[in-house]
Amino acid sequence: MHKPLLFLFPLPLALFPAVKIGITCYPTYGGSGAVATELGMELSKRGHEVHFISYAHPFRLPHFMERVYFHEVEIARYPLFEFPPYDLALAVTMHEVALRRELDLLHVHYAIPHAASAWIAKEMLGAEHDLKIVTTLHGTDITLVGQERSFREITRFSIGRSDGLTAVSDYLKRETETHFQVAPDDIEVIPNFVDPVRYDRDQYPCRKRTLLGSGEKLVIHISNFRPVKRIRDVVRTFHGICRSVPARLVLVGDGPDRPEALDEAQRLGIAERVIFLGKQDSVAELLACADLFLLPSESESFGLVALEAMASGVPVIATNVGGIPEVVEHGVTGYLAPVGATDEMAEAGIALLRDAEHWLAASTAGRTLAIERFSVDTIVPRYERYYERVLSGAVARGQTKGPLVKAASE
Ligand code: GMT
């Protein structure tokens, strides 16, 4: 269906001398861990040495890759520790790896607690080893968790002490400026990226027949099933769609709100139309046979999975919140509606699924936009250029060095 744009994918070539980079992320199912791991693997292909430092093997990391290492953070258990101090154990492993492997840079994904642990590791190293720290903000580390009273000051402090600070969307940059008083020049926006070769629906066999009845459309949602994803709205939107178009809803992933999906499907009498696949390694293969992707989130700083869907030629129906409009083009690559507007989202879904020409136009536009704006070959060199500027001292951040004052309004 879509012709591969091979000329857009030159062979990877590092833009500056190879460096040694430590990467810390949440290794479990989730966008920030996925981005961090894909970035590390791409950097290694471009000649850099990459050391993942976390409490478990990152879920998207295959077991062996040249120039890629994994260092597990060991957390000692002790009866006194009701809450084992992971942040300290992480700092110790970061310090140890930085020393032993002579790291140039630590790139941490998701501020809490990674940016604070990185700062401790840097302090432990002392001035002789000028380890640079880059923190990438992903979402709830700024918009939700970071603003909790108990985390706010440490988040502000540790992002202030990072030598480089990136955000995955303009929206997240604005949120960080507003809630943490960071100067606009101190935050570099580097959007998330996708590999258009992996997310190419034409390269996978169609598995629709194993999941659907004949003539049915495949509507899909992939997430970690947290409240912010509004799982009941996924099911309600699908309910509206399947009253007019024969379809099934495939739910991929797992998390605290998974029972809500089943409950809502039973309440609406469509439980037999909803298929739970749980956590899956290869979402590209599933997206390759999908007709529509639903993302009715309450908030989303970027929506990586929407980008992966678009690259796979799947039109996206989502909410008009956060950074989603920077990824999904309303009326072109999908449809954006207010939070909770499940009837409106269902109408938009029906319009797409009923009209083959309309669907193909949105599908092609989504893939083209994903390749043109968010291809791995465009975005990873932006990280390299940013690292180069941080390492050469060209990024001078107005750090939060003063005493940590509590906002008067609190
Ligand atoms: O911030 C989070 O809620 C977790 C994080 C994750 O690890 O899944 O998700 C965020 O980072 C992703 C990758 O940059 C973004 O695509 C998601 O939009 C963002 N989630 C939210 O903002 C809710």
Image (cartoon, grey):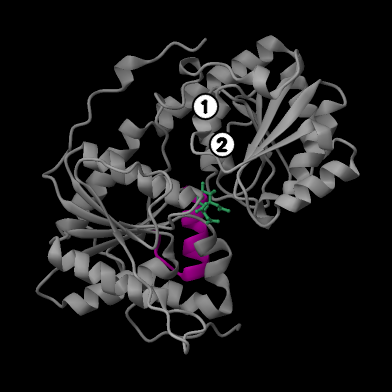
Residue at the image point whose x is 74% and y is 41% from the top: 234
For the stretch drawn in magenta, the main secondary structure is helix
Residue 399 percent coordinates (x, y): 32, 72
Residue 89 percent coordinates (x, y): 34, 74
Which circle marks residue 285 in the picture? 1
* 92 is higher (above) or lower (below) than 350: below
Residue 68 percent coordinates (x, y): 24, 47
Q: Earlier in the sequence, mark 2 or mark 1?
A: 1
Res. 119 image quadrant = bottom left
The quarter of the image holding the C terminus is: bottom right
- The span picked out in magenta is 169-184
Residue at the image point whose x is 35% and y is 77% from the top: 88
On whether residue 173 falls in the magenta region, the answer is yes
Residue on which the image places disc 2: 306
Res. 382 image quadrant = top left
On whether residue 259 falls in the magenta region, the answer is no
Total numbered labels: 2
